[in-house]
Image (cartoon, helix red, strand yellow):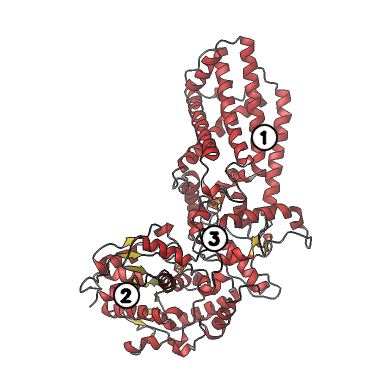
């Protein structure tokens, strides 16, 4: 086939150079982000990449994901076919025909079959976008029928069609190639043409394929389809473990806090923004977005990208005017201040994203900037900040009151070397009247199992969870330092908590402060005591129809799903019922991320949404494992006039079965 190589070589070189230049420009912007180590533990990173990028684990979780999975793998196989195609364009001898015949024919068959599969998948995707667009693709800044999305799909379709026409014409010209049965079908339909026409068709198909391929390649780094290039490395560079803690800050003179400008985010945050596929999975599960708030995690990521692109060159010039990253109201390319405060840090977005983008940590970094550099935060947080700083609890109650709940249990100070577990009661457990019942239930269970436990009494300080999620890192840092120093001084080796927020903070955040002790949530300890036969229940506690609500900081942030359910099964004699949205797909009660202390002024209240979902199941008891969830669900049930439904903690249900 007479391809004009002299014409193709400069076109190819220009296209490759332009592609490299575009990628370089994008990566240069990414490199402006703050340093972060994402290259340790290569084995675990490889495993994440194989699971999420090549295995498409989260993509497949949606029914339509199979189409994307097939298209992704077709794309990888066709890299080989397209590589050969381009090389052949440079020199006729650079072809897979140089390979041993069986291998060459085998590859030909694979490319033929995979091209058809890809064409079918593109057809399905086009039909879906045009005729059955999913809700989550149709928001104010994206559309399922966006020109760019349709153009990319159209280009892939043209590539596949050109492939079949090219090979069909060659088969019609030079005789059958049985290893290309699908191209042969195209060949049959061209069989009536003269040799000269067939050659013309082949050459035309070759050039169409070549030009579309080179344009497609150059479109990627300049469009939202950049994710085709960055998704695989992004999964390799993921946070290992759960992104439930953010890095410590140093409080030195001249230090900057959080992310008020786009380059104050880390380079990985910036890479994340270029990797977003705009699939809408995060916004679908976000409790704030679902209840009509300003926050949409997808938009947060999108706006970071737009800000990075719009500011572009200005970012490299210190002091150059630039678009702000955070504004009041809605502006493309900036996060809305209101949206930043809407986040409950529930982690649903983190669990949903197919390319492992970390939306919530970016929001916390922006909160850090607002609180620490700007002192700009919702008014109602002032009390919380002051109370926690001055009296080390959110209510500002005198520390001497902390151990009052314990009076019926006698003196229980933690004694180094003699007491096995420190019971870290937490502020809610010590001061909130409803939660004190849960605290007492935990203490009864520990006594019944013969566990040696003690408390720190007035020396215990707030763990600082709400402060850290709200961005008040300075006060959190002081509390964490003091708590950890106290634990170490007292020789604490094992800690029990009854609040998932304390649990997660002590277990995960305090590692940054050198705390390396065993931290268990009461539901985990109860479950293991039951399993070991150390805790014996005298009977079962009848609770009617019982529904279990997952706490985000127990489940999604720490993977504790089974323990509370098993404890409830043992205490009631039957498995607890489930909300429609449960476990990894659970729905926050609305109190996390410091939202416990804030008004909910827009949209529906998150706790009402959760309570309505509970009432669909007509429960007698809703069971929780978190003091905040307890408050939110009790309030919600009251507002819905469903006070006949009881809210109990796992510990209370188990304690009832002790009698
Ligand atoms: S952490 Fe929860 S509330 Fe915050 S953006 Fe993600 S899904 Fe929404
Ligand atoms: S951040 Fe992740 S889940 Fe959200 S739209 Fe982008 S790719 Fe999808
Ligand atoms: S209070 Fe409960 S449901 Fe709400 S964020 Fe915390 S753990 Fe999640």
Instruction: Identify the residue at image location x=34%, y=60%.
Output: 617
Q: Which residue is mark 1?
A: 215
Q: Position of residue 186 (x, y in %)?
A: 53, 19
Q: Position of residue 558 (x, y in %)?
A: 43, 64
Q: Which residue is mark 2?
A: 652
Q: Residues within 10 Å of mark 1 (few under 14, many from 20)?
A: few
- Comparing 383 with 509, the one in front is 383
The answer to whether 298 is drawn above or below residue 393 in the figure is: above
Instruction: Identify the residue at image location x=71%, y=33%.
Output: 13
Look at discs 3 and 1 and give the one toward the viewer. 3
User: Residue 444's image quarter?
Assistant: bottom left
Q: In terms of sequence position, does the residue under pointer 3 or pointer 1 come before the other?
A: 1
Q: Residue furthest left?
A: 538
Q: Regarding mark 2 in the picture, which secondary structure is present there?
A: helix
Look at discs 3 and 2 and give the one toward the viewer. 3
Q: Which residue is mark 3?
A: 292
The answer to whether 594 is drawn above or below residue 130 in the figure is: below
Q: Is residue 441 left or right of residue 107?
A: left
The answer to whether 635 is drawn above or below residue 566 in the figure is: below
The answer to whether one can see residue 150 in this image is yes
Instruction: Identify the residue at image location x=41%, y=87%.
Output: 403
**Quarter occupied by the N terminus:** top right
**Quarter occupied by the C terminus:** bottom left
Instruction: Identify the residue at image location x=48%, y=65%.
Output: 606
């Amino acid at each position: 086939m007479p391809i004009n190589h002299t014409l193709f070589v400069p076109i190819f070189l220009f296209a490759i150079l332009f592609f490299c230049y575009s990628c370089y420009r994008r990566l240069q912007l990414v490199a402006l982000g703050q340093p972060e180590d994402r290259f340790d533990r290569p084995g675990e990173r490889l495993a994440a990449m194989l699971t999420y990028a090549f295995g498409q684990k989260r993509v497949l979780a949606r029914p339509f994901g199979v189409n994307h999975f097939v298209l992704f793998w077709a794309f990888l196989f066709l890299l080989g076919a397209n590589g050969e195609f381009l090389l052949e364009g440079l020199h006729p001898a650079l072809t897979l025909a140089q390979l041993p015949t069986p291998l060459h024919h085998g590859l030909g068959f694979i490319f033929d079959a995979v091209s058809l599969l890809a064409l079918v998948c593109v057809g399905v995707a086009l039909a879906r976008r045009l005729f059955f667009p999913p809700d989550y693709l149709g928001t104010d800044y994206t559309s399922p029928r966006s020109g760019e999305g349709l153009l990319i799909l159209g280009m892939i379709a043209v590539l596949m069609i050109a492939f079949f026409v090219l090979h069909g014409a060659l088969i019609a010209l030079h005789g059958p190639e049985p290893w290309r049965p699908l191209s042969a079908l195209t060949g049959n339909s061209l069989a009536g043409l003269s040799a000269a026409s067939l050659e013309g068709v082949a050459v035309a198909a070759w050039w169409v394929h070549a030009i579309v391929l080179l344009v497609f390649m150059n479109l990627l780094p300049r469009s939202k389809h950049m994710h085709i290039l960055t998704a695989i490395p992004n999964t390799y560079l993921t946070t290992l473990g759960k992104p439930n803690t953010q890095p410590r800050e140093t409080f030195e003179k001249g230090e900057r806090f959080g992310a008020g400008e786009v380059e104050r985010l880390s380079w990985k945050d910036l890479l994340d923004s270029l990797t977003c596929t705009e699939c809408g999975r995060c916004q679908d599960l976000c409790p704030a977005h679902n209840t009509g708030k300003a926050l949409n995690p997808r938009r947060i990521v999108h706006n970071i990208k737009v800000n990075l692109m719009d500011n572009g060159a200005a970012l490299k010039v210190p002091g150059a005017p630039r678009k702000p990253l955070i504004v009041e109201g809605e502006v493309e390319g900036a996060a809305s201040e209101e949206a930043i405060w809407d986040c409950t840090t529930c982690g649903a977005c983190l669990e949903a994203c197919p390319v492992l983008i970390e939306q919530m940590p970016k929001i916390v970094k922006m909160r850090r900037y607002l609180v620490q550099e700007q002192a700009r935060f919702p008014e109602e947080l002032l009390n919380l900040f002051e109370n926690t700083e001055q009296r080390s609890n959110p209510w500002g109650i005198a520390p001497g009151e902390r151990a009052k709940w314990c009076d019926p249990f006698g003196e229980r100070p933690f004694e180094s070397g003699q007491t096995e577990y420190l019971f870290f009661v937490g502020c809610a457990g010590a001061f909130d009247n409803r939660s004190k019942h849960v605290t007492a239930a935990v203490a009864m269970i520990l006594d019944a199992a013969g566990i040696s436990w003690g408390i720190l009494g007035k020396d215990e300080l707030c763990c600082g969870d709400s402060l850290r999620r709200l961005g008040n890192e300075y006060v959190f840092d002081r509390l964490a330092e003091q708590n950890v120093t106290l634990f170490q001084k007292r020789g604490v080796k094992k800690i029990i908590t009854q609040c998932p927020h304390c649990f997660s903070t002590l277990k995960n955040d305090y590692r940054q402060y050198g705390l390396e002790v065993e931290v268990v949530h009461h539901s985990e300890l109860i479950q293991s005591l039951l399993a070991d036969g150390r805790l014996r229940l005298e009977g079962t506690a009848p609770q009617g129809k019982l529904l279990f609500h997952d706490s985000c900081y127990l489940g999604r942030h720490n993977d504790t799903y089974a323990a509370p359910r098993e404890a409830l099964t043992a205490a009631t004699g039957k498995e607890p019922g489930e909300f429609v949205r449960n476990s990894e797909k659970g729905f926050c009660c609305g109190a996390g991320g410091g939202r416990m202390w804030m008004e909910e002024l827009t949209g529906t209240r998150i706790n009402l949404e959760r309570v309505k979902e509970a009432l669909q199941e007509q429960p007698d008891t809703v069971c929780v494992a978190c003091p905040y969830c307890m408050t939110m669900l009790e309030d919600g049930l009251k507002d819905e006039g469903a006070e006949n439904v009881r809210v109990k903690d796992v510990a209370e249900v188990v304690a009832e079965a002790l009698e």
